[in-house]
């Protein structure tokens, strides 16, 4: 698709970007979306020109001076068919082209790296799997598909990076995702594009795109010393989840090892695939879907755990295999010894305790 007259629109987009009329194209999808955008623009301009020319031409041709007596002209089937078929064809091209891009935008590749982003009045908080936190910023490498899992802690927000041509709603109580692959290093705008209260205009940030090597360095320099899963492990113990979920044979709750990605049968016979969204619901509204063979004894944790805490728990459960210990495979633990992580904490990143439990 992006091959359609590439010279013309690439020249156009470069020129527009140069004069700050257009955001730069910094993701893989951006040039593809722009190609469609310029195609629609071109078709509209051609249509506009034809309509205006005909309008002016006919007003001159059929003016009162030339045709003092009005004349009834009957329709022409050929003419009407033509002006129906051609626009229909054009609109269908736009539809199919747009649909293809839409599916590409909303289908993350399997190797995408997941980063959680929590929107709240009025800031964006990103959580990297290794436990690094970004406030009103998002650090990412080039050449790596990134999936952002979004949620809002209060009202509707919208996560928008114009240079990547992506935008997705951050909704309270629900995970939504969006993905992109950055192609160029640099710093780009991050916006909230949903009016969300008085501080809305301050809900902005920088997307910092780095080379993979620089990103690795950033990860090492910004670590909190423990991954999200490790924070989750701690929270799991402090909330006494392990009173019921443990490896003991007389445990009152089901084993959570390897539950992520599996198919659960619920007490009403329904089958569900366990993903992030399901885990979140299972923790906050346990009585909504009860696993077959168990009693609905799990208490609700609604209002007791912050969204960051839920993310930690979800990451913890995702990393569980058999023994209720986090496998030491996350960025932080493989990349550096504990002491380095501590020293780096002073480096200006989030001081907020991850997985903090609301009072
Ligand atoms: C009083 C015992 C108890 C406690 C405490 C408890 N759970 Fe549960 N949990 C259960 C039972 C029983 C089920 C199965 C029935 C159901 O789905 O409600 C369950 C189901 C789940 C599920 C759904 C997956 C599955 O295999 O059914 C998840 C996820 C989960 N618990 C996580 C947690 C987390 C996280 C905590 C701590 C914040 C926690 N639980 C605390 C008893 C408990
Ligand atoms: Cu907002």
Image: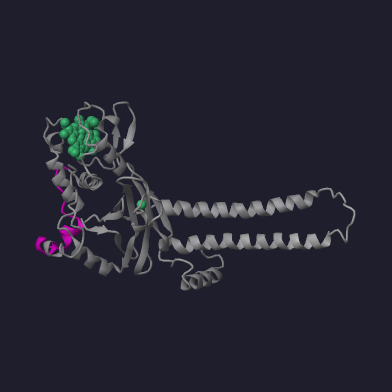
Task: Give percent across and percent down for residue 38.
Answer: 55, 63
The residue drawn where x is 77% and y is 53% is: 79
Q: Quadrant of the C terminus?
A: top left
**Ligand 1: which quarter?**
top left
Magenta stretch: includes residue 18:
no
The one of 39 and 251 positioned closer to us in this rendering:
39
In the image, residue 286 above or below residue 213? above
Q: Which residues are magenta?
A: 322-341
- Report if residue 256 is visible in the image: no
User: Does residue 185 appear left or right of residue 17 in this picture?
Assistant: left
Task: Give percent across and percent down for residue 6.
Answer: 53, 68
The residue drawn where x is 15% and y is 64% is: 344
**Residue 181 image-quadrant placement:** bottom left
- Report if residue 354 is visible in the image: yes
**Residue 235 image-quadrant placement:** top left
**Residue 90 image-quadrant placement:** bottom right
> Total label count?
0
In the image, residue 280 above or below residue 211? above
Task: Give percent across and percent down for residue 92.
Answer: 60, 51
């Amino acid at each position: 698709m992006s091959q359609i007259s590439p010279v013309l629109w690439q020249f156009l987009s470069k020129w527009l970007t140069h004069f700050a009329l257009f955001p730069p194209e910094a993701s893989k999808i951006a040039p593809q979306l722009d190609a469609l955008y310029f195609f629609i623009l071109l078709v509209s301009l051609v249509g506009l020109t034809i309509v205006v020319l005909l309008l002016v031409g006919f007003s001159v041709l059929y003016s009162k001076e030339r045709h003092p007596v009005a004349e009834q002209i009957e329709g022409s089937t050929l003419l009407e068919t033509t002006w129906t078929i051609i626009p229909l064809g054009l609109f269908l091209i736009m539809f199919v082209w747009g649909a293809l891009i839409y599916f590409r935008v909303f289908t993350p590749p399997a190797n995408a790296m997941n980063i959680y982003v929590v929107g709240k009045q009025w800031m964006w908080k990103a959580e990297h799997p290794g436990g690094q936190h970004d406030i009103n910023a998002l650090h990412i490498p080039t050449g790596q598909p990134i999936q952002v899992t979004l949620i809002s802690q209060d009202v509707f927000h919208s996560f928008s990076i114009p240079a990547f041509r992506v935008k997705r709603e951050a909704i309270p109580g629900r995970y939504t995702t969006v993905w992109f692959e950055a192609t160029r290093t640099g710093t780009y705008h991050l916006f909230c594009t949903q009016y969300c209260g008085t501080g809305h205009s301050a809900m902005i940030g920088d997307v910092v795109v780095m080379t993979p090597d620089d990103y690795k360095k950033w990860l090492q320099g910004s670590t909190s010393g423990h991954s999200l899963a490790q924070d989750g492990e701690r929270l799991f113990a402090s909330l006494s989840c392990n009173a019921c979920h443990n490896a003991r044979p007389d445990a009152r709750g089901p084993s959570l090892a390897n539950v992520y990605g599996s198919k659960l049968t619920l007490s009403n016979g329904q089958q569900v695939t366990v993903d992030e969204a399901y885990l979140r619901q299972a923790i906050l509204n346990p009585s909504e879907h009860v696993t077959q063979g168990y009693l609905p004894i799990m208490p609700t944790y609604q209002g007791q755990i912050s969204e960051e805490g839920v993310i930690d728990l979800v990451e913890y459960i995702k990393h569980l295999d058999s023994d209720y210990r986090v496998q030491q495979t996350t960025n932080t633990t493989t990349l550096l010894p504990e002491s380095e992580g501590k020293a780096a904490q002073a480096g200006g990143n989030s001081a907020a305790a991850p997985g903090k439990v609301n009072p």
